[in-house]
Image (cartoon, rainbow, N blue to C red):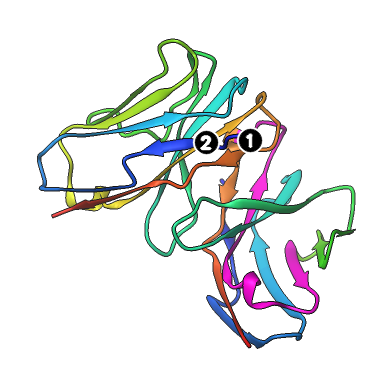
Amino acid sequence: EAGVAQSPRYKIIEKRQSVAFWCNPISGHATLYWYQQILGQGPKLLIQFQNNGVVDDSQLPKDRFSAERLKGVDSTLKIQPAKLEDSAVYLCASSLEDGDEQYFGPGTRLTVT
Amino acid sequence: GESVGLHLPTLSVQEGDNSIINCAYSNSASDYFIWYKQESGKGPQFIIDIRSNMDKRQGQRVTVLLNKTVKHLSLQIAATQPGDSAVYFCAVLRGTSYGKLTFGQGTILTVHP
């Protein structure tokens, strides 16, 4: 079974630029999560989707971050404009349904200079 | 809110030794506890979980102990192998939605051959 796919794996941008990350969850998984993992810390949930609807985006900095999952399958996370403190690994995870075990992708390492 | 902390940020052991990784949590209403392993360049991987109505659970070479009185969680790895070298996170959940998972800071386990 294919795992959660993410791209790109690495991205370096200058502050105030824009960036987008892509995630393709495990086939059939209804729930998709985006996490931010700052170096040396555990992942922090940014947003949770159930199919194409947002379940929880309470920790998403909405002035600069946006995410969508229009067809209820793959998802994109965008940062515009980026700040230095956005440097982190952005992890995508999926689960069959909310409450089921989460499977994580390899992440995208973002460096903002 | 929930906060999760670890007693030691790093742990070095010899191959074949037993490893113990500790975790403290703050919310006594937490229902569900999970240990994750994260290898370099990869997303977190589920190791073992335990519910609040249990105090011990065993898996293959791993045991999780839960002490609700002192709000402490530990992961024991028997006969530690070099492949066990990784960062280990505990995560706690209140309720059933994985979206409310709170991760701790992580312990770096290094196994020397």
Viewer-side residue, B10 vs B67:
B10
Range drawn in magenta = B71-98
Instruction: Report the amino acid beneath label 1.
Output: Tyr
Answer above or below: position of A34 versus B14. Answer: above
The chain to which mark 1 is attached is: B
Residue appearing at x 59%, y 73% in the figure: B85
| Amino acid type, label 2 | Val
Q: Which mark is residue A4?
A: 2
Q: Give the total of numbered labels.
A: 2
Q: Residues within 10 Å of mark 1 (few under 14, many from 20)?
A: many
- Residue at image position (41%, 24%) is A75
- Of B66 and A17, nearer the camera is A17
Task: State the residue lying farthest toward the front.
Answer: A1
Residue A29, above or below A82: above
Could you classify mark 2 by the number of other residues whose Cα lies within 10 Å: few (under 14), some (14-19), or many (20 or more)?
Answer: many
On the same chain, marks 1 and 2? The answer is no
For residue B98, the mark is: 1
